[in-house]
Amino acid sequence: MNSQNNNMKVEENKIASETQNIADAAPQIPRSKLEEEGHSLLIVDLLRLPRTFSYRRYRLDVIGFLLAWLWVVLLLALGYWVTRIGA
């Protein structure tokens, strides 16, 4: 029974190390001055966000996203205002 547990643990360790090796095999994102100044693309780095996210790096994407939402809200408010003119 004890040897079976040891064999299972060895197999689990092998699988864990293989998984880690696969994760390490993913190409690293090259670092550049532009990336650090906020010119990195959020959608491109989507799978690496837990490791690489910082406001400074994705500043332009975050600002653009917020401005897009502001534009949508303004268009909806304008539409509501136009419908109220005829009422």
Image: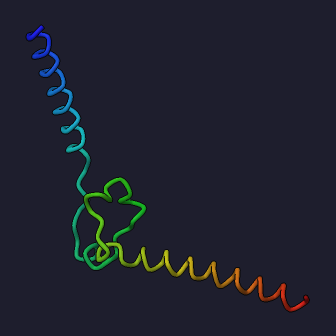
Query: Toward which corner of the image does residue 15 lie, by quadrant?
Result: top left
Residue visible at 35% across and 53% down?
A: 47
Q: Residue lying furthest bottom in this view?
A: 85
Which quadrant of the figure contains the C terminus? bottom right
The image's colouring method is rainbow
Q: Position of residue 31 (x, y in %)?
A: 22, 67
Q: Position of residue 19 (x, y in %)?
A: 23, 35
Query: Toward which corner of the image does residue 50 lie, by quadrant?
Result: bottom left
Residue visible at 84% across and 84% down?
A: 83
Along the horizontal axis of the image, is 18 left or right of 60? left
Along the horizontal axis of the image, is 61 left or right of 3? right
Which quadrant of the figure contains the N terminus? top left
Residue visible at 15% across and 26% down?
A: 14
Q: Is residue 7 above or below residue 37?
A: above
Along the horizontal axis of the image, is 39 left or right of 5? right
Q: Is residue 17 above or below residue 46?
A: above
Q: Residue lying furthest front in this view?
A: 1
In this view, the residue in front, 37 or 71, is 71
Q: Is residue 78 above or below residue 33?
A: below
In this view, the residue in front, 50 or 44, is 50
Query: Toward which corner of the image does residue 59 lie, by quadrant?
Result: bottom left
Q: Position of residue 10 (x, y in %)?
A: 12, 21
Residue visible at 30% across and 65% down?
A: 53
Q: How many marks?
A: 0
Q: Residue lying furthest right in this view?
A: 86
Along the horizontal axis of the image, is 57 left or right of 70? left
